[in-house]
Image: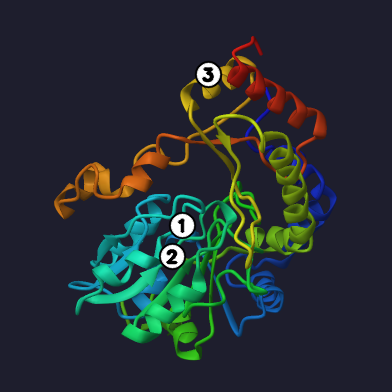
Amino acid sequence: MIPLINLDRQFQQIKAEAMEAFSRVYDSGQYILGAEGKQFEEEVKAYLNTPYAIGVGNGTDALVLALDALGIGEGDEVITTPFTFFATAEAISRVGATPVFVDIESKTFNIDTTQINDVINEKTKAIMPVHLFGQPADMKAIMTIAKANNLYVIEDACQAFGATVNGKKAGTIGDIGCFSFFPTKNLGTMGDGGMIVTKHNHVSEKIRLLRHHGSTKKYYHEEIGYNSRLDEVQAALLRISLTHIDEWNSNRQSAAAFYNQEFMTLQGVTVPHIQSDSEHIYHLYCLDLENRDGISTGLSKAKIANGVYYPRPLHLQEVYKGLSYNVGDFPIAEKKSKSLLAIPMHPYLSKDEQVEIIRTISSVVSGSKP
């Protein structure tokens, strides 16, 4: 089987460094909010060129804490995309606010900024764009709209650590940026982890308060908070991974370039679009296919992993029936849920594996046996 992502192959590359780091944490006797987490925050600040970075328990918590820190809750609305992982909208609902969906662009699969103004009203408090699959959303347009309407911008950059927009790192352009370090992410760990970055000192202080039970002094609590802290073991491993992230993202881009070259002229197959002002770091490599089911079946028969991201847009999820969205409300998102297919992509994908993947897909398209 050729896996969709090969974590074993990736983590084996840093095993010796990881074992040393684990030993260091083990011997320190400090496993929560210790030196590793603090140093990782400093290193992320330097890498992203952002004033404040706060480690949290996971990417979903990052989104929830970001919304809470901005005072967004009951009666408020947050504009986002229906074509993303559930956590994006879930976080909005978790704080008591209402997700308001806007359809996506047909090429980038990110939120269509030309439709955002249509849903802004007095209840709207923020825009939450998602940098889907590692491709940044149109942040210039989003920031212009936000400024004109006095709205916050919370970037869901959970799939885009290291991606850039006009030379700036994704996650650092809006008021707050949120990252996930789930193992399969470009910058991942061997468990859960997340990070919030912001340009605002007061937001940073509020998030630090909230992530630790609303407390700045042990057993004294100023607010109802959360228990969401990046533990020392994960922080230590992430510090190592951070030194490799540019290499890993570059490897993904090279693999994507080879895919693009080979698939570009294949009938019924559309390769990922790359915005001229941004750098795509391919958390996932998704082909837009006329015959997705046939190609998926062909790949599976050839023992090549593949996946659908995402099979049901958020506005059609059972949990959001109360929002009264219907089939046809967001036609592009609904269409892409039936045509996109992720094929293997990771930093240590071999050329031989890619050739086999390309050969299999080409055979299905041509009607010959793989």
Distance in Å between CA atoms under marks 1 and 2: 8 Å
**Residue indicated by mark 3:** 297
Q: Position of residue 99 (x, y in %)?
A: 27, 62
C-alpha separation, residue under disc 2 versus residue under disc 3:
33 Å
Q: Nearer the viewer, mark 1 or mark 2?
A: 1
Q: Residue at x 37, y 57 (%)?
A: 81
User: Split into 4 quadrants, where in the image is the C terminus?
Assistant: top right
Q: Residue furthest top?
A: 369
Q: Residues within 10 Å of mark 3 (few under 14, many from 20)?
A: some
Q: Which mark is residue 129?
A: 2
Task: Assign a secondary structure to mark 2.
Answer: loop
Question: Given the image, on which type of amino acid does mark 2 rest?
Answer: Pro
Three-letter amino acid code at disc 3?
A: Thr
Q: Quadrant of residue 154?
A: bottom left
Does the residue at mark 1 contact the one at mark 2 (Cβ under 8 Å)?
yes
Q: In the image, 88: left or right of 47?
A: left
Measuring 28% from the left and 67% from the top, which residue is drawn there? 95
Q: Residue at x 45, y 50 (%)?
A: 106
Say whether marks 1 and 3 touch (CB < 8 Å).
Answer: no
Q: Is residue 91 above or below residue 38?
A: above
Position of residue 262 relative to residue 79, above or below, is above
Quadrant position of residue 147: bottom left
Which residue position holds label 1?
110
Query: Could one spot residue 225 in this view of the protein?
Result: no
Relative depth, front residue between 311 and 66:
311
Rendered position, 132 above or below 290: below
Instruction: Give how far apart the Cα atoms at labels 1 and 3 are.
Output: 27 Å
Residue 124 lies, with reference to residue 294, above or below; the image says below
